[in-house]
Amino acid sequence: MSKKILGRTDIIDFPQLGLFNIDVKMDTGAYTSTIHCSEIIEVDNALLCIFNSNVHKNFGKTEIIFDTFWRTDVKSSNGYKENRYKVKSEVVFFGKTYKINLTLSTRDAMKFPVLIGRQFLRQKFIVDVDLENVSFNFNSKNKA
């Protein structure tokens, strides 16, 4: 399987989450991928997640219930360890849907609502930091 080339940023869809045209940053320094989640409520062995932001575009108030979830430790670049919820979802790159594990974190203070980490990128993609929006531009060209 040949690897596709991505740029350092892109605009992608998370159809299971009802999130479309979301700005993402490839983070080859991060192992896990993470997505902005404004509110997380654990109820009756399920996780109610509210994806909402006044800062990040295309994050309307979307509520998703996950029946399957777990917790994992995530270490930031400054060495701080945080225990986060982790869920499975789907993401679309180059018109193809992939499974992805996402940790949930409040990212309103960050420029990008989503970071795509090595766990997802490996064996599928190469990141060229000189490029941007490669998948988005590919999809736009193929829809025309």
Image (cartoon, helix red, strand yellow):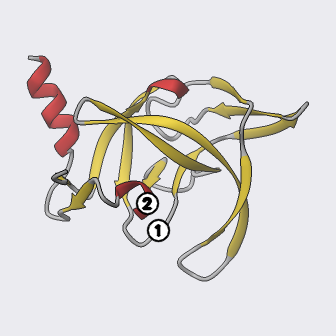
In the figure, residue 49 lies in which quadrant?
top right
Image x and y of residue 4, in percent: 17, 50
Residue corresponding to mark 1: 30
Q: Residue at x 57, y 82 (%)?
A: 78
Residue at the extreme right of the image, as rendered: 44
Gap between marks 1 and 2, in whole Å? Answer: 5 Å
Marker disc for residue 52:
none
The amino acid beneath tag 2 is Gly
- Nearer to us in this view, 8 or 122: 122
Residue at the extreme top of the image, as rendered: 144
In the figure, residue 88 lies in which quadrant?
top right
Q: Residue at x 37, y 68 (%)?
A: 28
Q: Residues within 10 Å of mark 1 (few under 14, many from 20)?
A: some
Disc with the residue nearer the chain's start (1 vs 2): 1
Helix, strand or loop status at disc 1: loop
Residue corresponding to mark 2: 117
- Nearer to us in this view, 39 or 108: 39
In the figure, residue 81 lies in which quadrant?
bottom right
User: With respect to residue 59, does 109 lie above or below?
Assistant: below
